[in-house]
Image: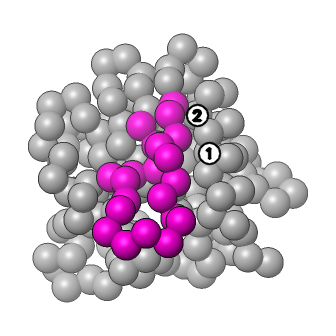
Amino acid sequence: MAISGKAFENRFREGWKKSFPDGIIIRLYDTTNGYKNISNICDFIGYVYPNIFLLECKAHAGASIPFDKITQYDKMKDFVNVYGLRVGVILYLYEKDKVFYIPIKTIETMKSDGKKSVGLKAVEEGYRIIEIPSTKLRVFMDSDYTILRELNEGD
């Protein structure tokens, strides 16, 4: 069963609010209205003292997602080295019941290494990918995003 990206975004927002009751999560206006060359930097902007997060949410079947499906990468990579800013992708591999935070810097490294996708194999290969502690529900995962407090500069 395919999981809608919008449904996962809603689930992510709920999980963020539960994980960070004193934090902020803002869904940027969705520009999937057919206009070319108009797009946001990411899906969500989050804040948890002392960091700001630029987060793109993706739900994908299988064990990995091709880089060409991470359409906001080119915009997000420009913000990687800003102090206190965490820039990454929240990836839900729904057939594998796994949720990950993938720093854009990791995707940049993988691309320079000639990789074409990111997922379970990249975790096994030792790339900097953070598994989000999650419990399987009927359809989605109940995820605890508090591990994101432990990110390093550049993540």
Q: Amino acid at mark 2?
A: Trp
Position above or below: 78 against 146: below
Judged from the image, the secondary structure of the residue bearing numbered disc 1 is: helix
Q: Write down the residue under mark 2.
A: 16
- Farthest residue to the front: give it: 35
In magenta segment, residue 49: no
Q: Which residues are magenta?
A: 25-45
In depth, the one of 126 and 66 nearer the eye is: 66
* Labelled disc at residue 25: none
Using residue 107 as the reference point, say whether residue 68 is left or right of it: right
Badge 1 vs badge 2, beta-carbon distance below 8 Å = yes
Which residue is drawn at the image coordinates 52% and 54% (left, top)? Answer: 30
Q: How many marks?
A: 2
User: Is the C terminus in the top left, top right, bottom left or bottom right quadrant?
Assistant: top left
Q: Write down the residue under mark 1.
A: 12
Using residue 33 as the reference point, say whether residue 85 is left or right of it: left
Residue 126 can be seen in this image: no
In depth, the one of 125 and 110 nearer the eye is: 110
Give the main secondary structure, helix, strand or loop, of the magenta stretch: loop
Q: Amino acid at mark 1?
A: Phe
Q: Position of residue 106 (x, y in %)?
A: 25, 61
Which residue is drawn at the image coordinates 35% and 77% (left, top)? Answer: 67
Position above or below: 112 against 73: below
* Quarter of the view holding residue 19: top right
Q: Position of residue 85 (x, y in %)?
A: 25, 35
Which residue is drawn at the image coordinates 14% and 37% (left, top)? Answer: 82
* Quarter of the view holding residue 121: bottom left
- Farthest residue to the top: give it: 22
